[in-house]
Amino acid sequence: MSGNATVRDGVLETIRSGKLPDRCAERTWAGRGCGATCAICGRPVNADELEYELEFVTHDDGKQPTAYHVHNACFWAWECERRKLASKRSAETTVELSEMIAEARVAEDGREAPGSQGST
């Protein structure tokens, strides 16, 4: 398996398991690694590597923002997969809404059609 496929698999597992959100971070910083463990691959992000720090705010629990440290390559793999998942959810929602609108129109047309009620 290629290195890119391994990183992608790691990203998808991290999202699936809930270790890293699949939504855009509220704040993102980039800089030299600080030795923190990468939230995606589990390896430390060393000082000679570029590190992204992602900050997510959870609005429902009132806690402090949660920060995740990730390698440059891990960040871009996560960003790509996150966007794919968001696009897929958006497309599914569009289809569901279209189906609901179509059903409502059919029901509305059935009620308005002359002779549709009480005819035999």
Image: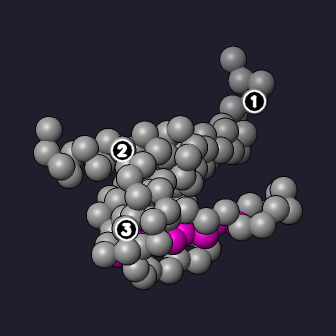
Q: Amino acid at mark 1?
A: Gln
Q: Quadrant of the C terminus?
A: top right
Using a 10 Å C-alpha cutoff, classify the residue at mark 1 as few (fewer than 14 neighbours), some (14 to 19) or many (20 or more): few
Dot 3, how many residues are within 10 Å of its Cα: few (below 14), some (14-19), or many (20+)?
A: some
Mark 1 or mark 3: which comes first in sequence?
A: 3
Circle nearer the N terminus (3, 2): 2
- Residue 58, visible in the rendered structure: yes
- Counting from the top left corner in percent of width and height, residue 16 is at 50, 39
Give the residues in magenta: 50-57
- Return the residue at label 2: 10
The part of the image, by quadrant, that contains residue 51 is bottom left
The mark nearer the N terminus, 2 or 1, is: 2
Contact between marks 3 and 2 (CB within 8 A): the answer is no
SS of the residue under disc 3? loop
Q: Mark 1 = which residue?
A: 117
Tell me if residue 23 comes above or below residue 50 in the rendering.
above
Front tag of 3 and 2: 3
User: Element under label 2?
Assistant: helix
Residue occupying image coordinates x 18% and y 49%? 3
Q: Whole-Å distance between the Cαs marked 3 and 2?
A: 19 Å
Front residue of 66/8: it is 66
48 and 70: which is toward the camera: 48
Query: Disc 2 or disc 1, which is closer to the eye?
Result: 2
* Residue type, mark 3 in image: Asn
Residue type marked 2: Gly
